Amino acid sequence: MNKNWQIPRRKFLRGLGTIIALPMLDVMLPSMSAFAAAAGSKPQGFPKRLAFVYVPQGKNMDDWTPTAFGEDYELPMILQPLKDFQKDFTLLTGLAHEQANSMGDGGGDHARASATYLTGCHPKKTAGADIKAGISVDQIAAGKIGDQTRLPSLELSCDEGQRAGSCDSGYSCSYQFNLSWKSETQPVNPEVNPRAVFDRLFASNDQGESKAAQSRRALFDQSVLDFAMDDARQFQKNLGATDRRKLDEYLTAVREIELRVQRAEKFQGTVPDGVVAPEMFENYEQQIRLMFDMLALAFQTDSTRVSTFIMAHDGSNRPYPFIGVSDGHHDLSHHRGDLHKKALIAKINHFHTTQLAYFLQKLKSVKEGDGTLLDNCMIVYGSGISDGNQHLHENLPVLIAGRGGGSITPGRHLKVEDKTPMTNLYLSLLDRMGAPAERVGDSTGKLEVIA
């Protein structure tokens, strides 16, 4: 190891059609401090990351909401999968999205729940091309700090839906299948294909070179790592034992994810015209976890600091037979007080928080200085609806995981004034991201109770 060797944080391993961002290594830390000193400021520590994870149809709120506030509260049934992370997240009760209410527009609560969730704006009711909502909080952040990373933001989804036409009571499908809005008339379509996500993270920006690499990989059954190994071997010579181990673990994780993407592609197969294609994955859980793994890598390598992930779109009628729920989720959400249906909804909700726990464990397993990647994240998990039967948009289920680089005090269940705009929380998160804004949608002020 060369003890005097330092590398910048923005180090990549390169090869034909390949660019592999590196995780934070010990050898990078001196360069971060030196950069800050040269700029005449104190070291700012590790970058903060912001993600919004969306689930549809709200929750069975009786099994979501703890009966006590503060630190000493018991996790209800839906939140039990997160018991190992109770000191790592904050629960908020009382937040609302008033702009998701009808306001004279009639039905369409699922479309409004999605369109309003990150914008805080009431969407224009139209099934045509004249859609209109507002700029979403993630895109506000991406517009201000996106130039500091390779990808300004990363939008993911497990549901490939229509991008035009009517989906919910006269509302365009664009509202229901998108969370991110770059402008009030321009949604940002999330990526559903895991290969496309993988290539965004690890393919070169040179399109001609990338296509050549893809063809060669397919012909010789090669990995993206094969093209960067010469660079990796040269790089490793100067690393200490700890950094070599970190790099080996990281490259192994990249390869494992690449293999899972390849298996998903083979499983999908080709179908004749007029036949509905099979799911790309053997099961839904596999799909969610692969997306979460790639998001964790994107944050670990500082490829992006802003992301959204739609586990399932609002209005989704997906069944969950693998957990004993054969009825569609949307159908069950109109339970009319039926206790059996509410119990089945709680099982679906429990499944979703189990996947969130998987993601949080991934983030917590990555060391950053004296803490973890999760410590430097703000993961907002929730829905634009609370009770799906009544299509309520108040007392929303909201969970924030992570410490925001020390700016959030987790481990608490907090009650805010009823009907406090959800966008007030977003203003506070933008401040912590170094991307302050005067307003997000219908915000009325910052929500500093999370500090």
Image (cartoon, rainbow, N blue to C red):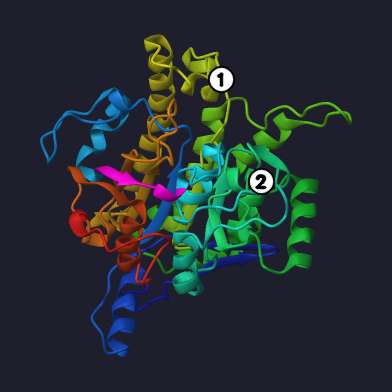
Badge 1 amino acid: Gly
Question: Which residue extends farthest right?
Answer: 273
Residue 328 numbered mark, or none: 1
Q: Is residue 267 above or below residue 18?
A: above
Badge 2 amino acid: Ser
The image quadrant where one finds the C terminus is bottom left
* Residue position marked by numbered label 2 in the rendering: 172
Q: Is residue 10 visible?
A: no
Is residue 93 covered in magenta? yes
* Residue nearest the viewer, comparing 9 with 401: 401
- Quarter of the image for residue 7 reads bottom left
Q: Earlier in the sequence, mark 1 or mark 2?
A: 2
- x then y, percent, for residue 273: 89, 31
Q: Is residue 103 visible?
A: yes
- Quarter of the image for residue 131 reads bottom right
Q: Residue at x 22, y 56 (%)?
A: 408
- x then y, percent, for residue 126: 66, 49
Residue 5 numbered mark, or none: none
- x then y, percent, for residue 149: 49, 69
Q: Residue at x 38, y 34 (%)?
A: 386
Q: Main secondary structure of the magenta part?
A: strand
Structural distance between the alpha carbons of marks 1 and 2 = 22 Å
Left-right relation of 401 to 69: right
